[in-house]
Image (tube, rainbow, N blue to C red):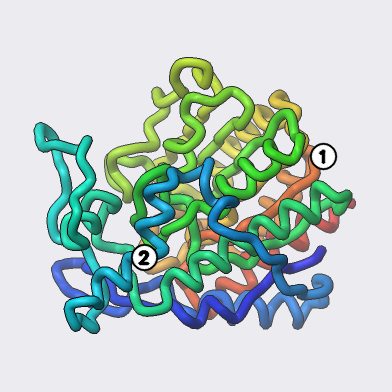
Amino acid sequence: MLTVFSSSHHLHHGKELKDGALTPSFEEPGRADTILRRVRAVGLGNVIACRPFGLAHYIGAHSERYVRFLSTAWQQWSAGGRTSDALPLVWPVRNMRDDIEPSVIEGKLGYFSMDAGAPITAHTWNAVAESANLALTGAELVLEGARSAFALCRPPGHHAGREYMGGYCYLNNAAIAASHAIAKGARRVAVLDVDFHHGNGTQDIFYERPDVLTVSIHGDPSVSYPYFSGNADERGSHAGTGFNLNLPLAKGTDWAAYTQALKLACQAVAAHAPDLLVVSLGVDTFENDPISHFQLKSDDFSRLGDQIASIRCPTLFAMEGGYMVDEIGINAVNVLQGFEARG
């Protein structure tokens, strides 16, 4: 399996507001570096650079004004001499106006954010754009005939909606890849999100569309971030009704319970008969992950990859979450090896 990687991810590492304190983000450069070392150690396949893409490739999954905001946010923030990370302070909550984009960066940050977990630093945009380009490159490789590819994306993307960032995510890599596949002629695409946290951004982007099936297995939102999406009754709307499947699971879920949901997810994907399957590959379902509460063990991730392979569909894996830096490489690559082993 080819791995698409860029060292540009090192350009981004900011601070998040968590537990009442501003601290270095759990989403840090060592995550991708550890996975890359494991990819090479097991001989998964060649590691290649991404192809060039531009702003136009991010528009569709995201709005033009949101992409414009992301690409210029640091320049606007730092224009007044500020050097600290840019984070939002005010959000347009219930009964406040959300139909008018503020003209100043202080307002824009809240307007285009869902939380204070996506800091913008001097080089965030460069890392974010390159991460999306990794997913786009992987999608093209699969559309050109590869059975599978692994986009080692960092920052991750599945919490980024059509017009908002949050949860360490800025551009939705998986959604951008899926949209690109449709634009290149794919009739149907499926996105299977196995990250511990609900893929709220992916759901938002495709909620009214029947050509992209979105399936997410995640922690029950009543007790798990992002709290306000991911319930089982969120099934899509308008033309997209029935094309969004959420499988929320209880705190402490182990492999025995997880695999039942995974079987339902794989059945749904197979029934959709996609030309491309995009897997939002989060491994924060691991038993020792510091910000999650499932109980999967490292060997379970090999079984996860095997079940995904049973769908028999061209597959792009796009890296999402997983914050145990010591084990993240083992767990992520176990999924990929489990997929490859089925043949």
Marks 1 and 2, how far apart at CA: 41 Å
Instruction: Find numbered disc 1 in the image and state the secondary structure of the residue it sits on.
Output: loop
Question: How far across and down, in percent of the image, does residue 299 sit?
Answer: 66, 62
Seen at 59% across and 51% down, the residue is 57
Mark 1 or 2, closer to the camera: 2
Q: Check the image and report above or below for 96 versus 110.
A: above
On the question of residue 130 being in view, the answer is: yes
Residue on which the image places disc 1? 312
Q: Earlier in the sequence, mark 1 or mark 2?
A: 2
Question: How far across and down, in percent of the image, does residue 285 sit?
Answer: 49, 57
Q: Which mark, residue 254?
A: none
Residue on which the image places disc 2? 72
Seen at 44% across and 19% down, the residue is 237
Which of 141 and 261 lies nearest the eye of the viewer? 141
Q: Check the image and report above or below for 339 versus 333.
A: above
On the question of residue 218 being in view, the answer is: no
Amino acid type assigned to the residue bearing label 1 in the image: Arg
Seen at 35% across and 49% down, the residue is 164
Q: Check the image and report above or below for 245 versus 89.
A: above
Question: How far across and down, in percent of the image, does residue 8 sit?
Answer: 56, 78
Seen at 27% across and 69% down, the residue is 76
Which of 325 and 93 lies nearest the eye of the viewer? 93
Amino acid type assigned to the residue bearing label 2 in the image: Thr
Question: How far across and down, in percent of the image, does residue 48 sit?
Answer: 77, 73
